[in-house]
Amino acid sequence: MLLVLSEEHKEHLGFLSEVDPAVVGEFGRIAVEFLKKGSNPKIYEGAARKLNVSSESVQHGVEGLMYLLTESSKLMISEVDFQDSVLVLGFSEELNQLLLQLYLENRKEIRQILGKLAPSLPHYHNLEWRLDVQLASRALRHQVKPTVTLKLHLEDGAKRSARVLQTDPATLQHLIHELERALAELKSSHCRRILRNIK
């Protein structure tokens, strides 16, 4: 799978061809550090002074490299696909090899960082249910009013919680129908392609 780069992104990465390969290696290290700790404008300014360029150019170059590495790691692009993706940038063979080396050395660490950044949501642990039927009341002697009570147990890491939901059978039937439609949509080729790109 090839990584498709926008024109703006190509322009930002174009700055890398103007600097020494050792500087590109340092930019790669800075990009991974920024993923861990966040952006630091002072580093951009220091590098800009050393290279005698604007700090904005350095920032765009590092952020472009960061985007290239994160997207490639997120999609788990193979070596060949990474090289083909970078080939459209028109870099020298030495710079292409350096970018490939940066990617291969850092992709596992970048995936771990991205995994930590993802929100942690509670997930299903157990479900208890009960069907209650009110057959009559003082006001109405012959009434049938069914109610379904659900106790949904959720797990978020080591923490567990429970949610109690109450509904009538018609609403529950509608909910089941909508969830089944969502599962069917998940099996479509379009959805599988999106999920493959997310992982």
Image (cartoon, rainbow, N blue to C red):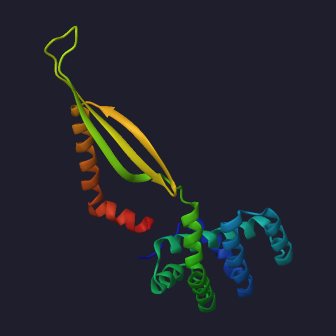
What percent of the width, then of the height, locates residue 118?
A: 54, 59
Judged from this view, the residue extending furthest toward the top is 139
Say whether residue 36 is left or right of residue 132: right
What residue is drawn where x is 48% and y is 83%? 84
In depth, the one of 34 and 146 nearer the eye is 146
Q: Is residue 54 visible in the rendered structure shown here?
A: no
**Quadrant where the C terminus is found in the figure:** bottom left
Say whether residue 46 is left or right of residue 72: right
Say whether residue 93 is left or right of residue 155: right
Q: Is residue 68 above or below residue 130?
A: below
What residue is drawn where x is 39% and y is 37%? 164
Q: How many marks?
A: 0
What residue is drawn where x is 49% and y is 79%? 85
Can you tell which quarter of the image residue 146 is in? Answer: top left
In depth, the one of 92 and 110 nearer the eye is 110
What percent of the width, then of the height, locates residue 62?
A: 69, 71
**Quadrant where the N terminus is found in the figure:** bottom left
Judged from this view, the residue extending furthest toward the left is 142
Q: Is residue 16 above or below residue 158?
A: below
Can you tell which quarter of the image residue 167 is in? Answer: top left
What percent of the width, then of the height, locates residue 120?
A: 52, 56
In depth, the one of 37 and 96 nearer the eye is 37
Say whether residue 196 is left or right of residue 103: left
What residue is drawn where x is 17% and y is 20%? 135
In depth, the one of 68 and 168 nearer the eye is 168
What percent of the width, then of the height, locates residue 82?
A: 50, 81
Can you tell which quarter of the image residue 96 is in? Answer: bottom right
